[in-house]
Image (cartoon, helix red, strand yellow):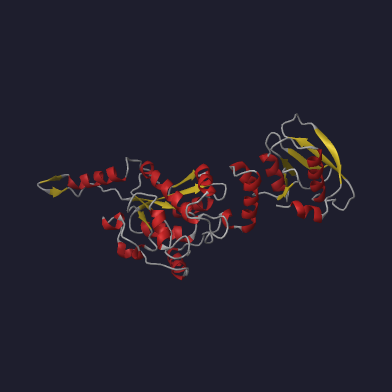
Amino acid sequence: MRKEFCTGPGRRNKQILSEFRLHAGGKPNLSLRVRSMRALALLSGGLDSILAARLIREQGVEVVGIGFSSPFFDCRKGEEAAREMEIDFHCFDLSARFLQMMEHPPHGYGKNLNPCVDCHRLMVKEAFSRMERLGADFVITGEVLGQRPKSQNRAALRAVAGAGAPGLLLRPLSAKLLEETVAEKEGWVNRSRLLGLSGRGRKKQLELAERFGIKNYSSPGGGCLLTESEFCRRLKELKKHEGWKRRRIELLRLGRHFRLPSGARAVSGRDERENKELARRAVVGDYLFQAAGRPGSLVLLRKKTKPDRKDLELAASICARYSKEKSSSELKIRCWKKNENGDERIINARPMVEEELEGMRI
């Protein structure tokens, strides 16, 4: 796959025109090979973003995929879609800027803690900031007018477009219903071959998917944790007690969470994979608990200050509750501190009853 890095859209277009203008006797030298235009496609891996890229590539425009990651979503689906289309794909981490925006999104949240308008706006802004580096002439997205009443109405689409260079954001699926972009005016793409989709229906998209032979794509809105109510409940609780930091947020994706009376947080792994991941994510000062000599949940205890005896006992009791022998009256629970020379102690703990758990469950 060809990679071409150049000085930016404006300079690149002038270079293309200059190749046409090299002539003898007043006639253009058409024997020179003209480079195709290049579009930078925001590729989430959803059907709409894939279709937008395919429609533009069908017009002879080279398409390069771009995606972004944060504690709430990643680039995996976009990368898979790019691999299917055999195009280059670039993933960039947006965590710091995203969390800053999340604190007070100008256009507000959706049903949960999803700041969709400001999320799209941030991604478009970041895509435009990388156009020069990636040698792109314009940016495309899979947004459809009216598909989401709050985040894809005309006002929202204008707000998103305002994050980039004027006229260089093209939405191929709804282009005929929107103002002409530079790519259309300059003939880089043929407007008549773009679409005029609107509303929540997806019949036309599914027909196009069949025509293009597209079978692998993620569900609409899938993949973003900020649309999941249970995760957002945990996220609100975390902001209240600890604040939003990437490491803390990533821990929310694992296990069962409990807030102890002292403010400490205990996280109980639900299976062997989560046990291993909790152990990997433990930092200096964290305590870990697991039943001695038998299978069971690994519990991570984290507190801003040093946990006291009561914290350790409660965490051990939670660990006993989720061991394979939870019916026992008392279990021996191993307890060790992260990076403390491997020293551990044994705590005799009774399995915590459900009523006690519910009072602390996040």
- Image location (x, y in percent) of residue 202: 47, 68
Q: Is residue 338 shown left or right of residue 85?
A: right
Could you tell me residue 130's position as x and y percent? 40, 43
Horizontal side of 360 relative to 106 (left or right) equals right
Given residues 127 and 209, the one toward you in this image is 127
Task: In the rendered view, tell whether residue 48 sits above or below residue 7.
Answer: below
Query: Which residue is at the front of the view, 169 or 274?
Result: 169
Is there any visible trace of residue 40 in the rendered image?
A: yes
Q: Camera-side residue: 29 or 203?
A: 203
Extreme residue in the top direction = 341
> Where 92 falls versus 143 (above or below)?
above
| Vertical position of residue 283 compared to residue 201: above or below | above
Relative height, residue 225 to residue 280 (above, below): below
- Left or right, residue 315 beside residue 277: right
Residue 108 horizontal/vertical position (percent): 51, 55
Residue depicted at x 90% and y 50%: 329
Which residue is located at x 41 percent, y 58 percent? 157
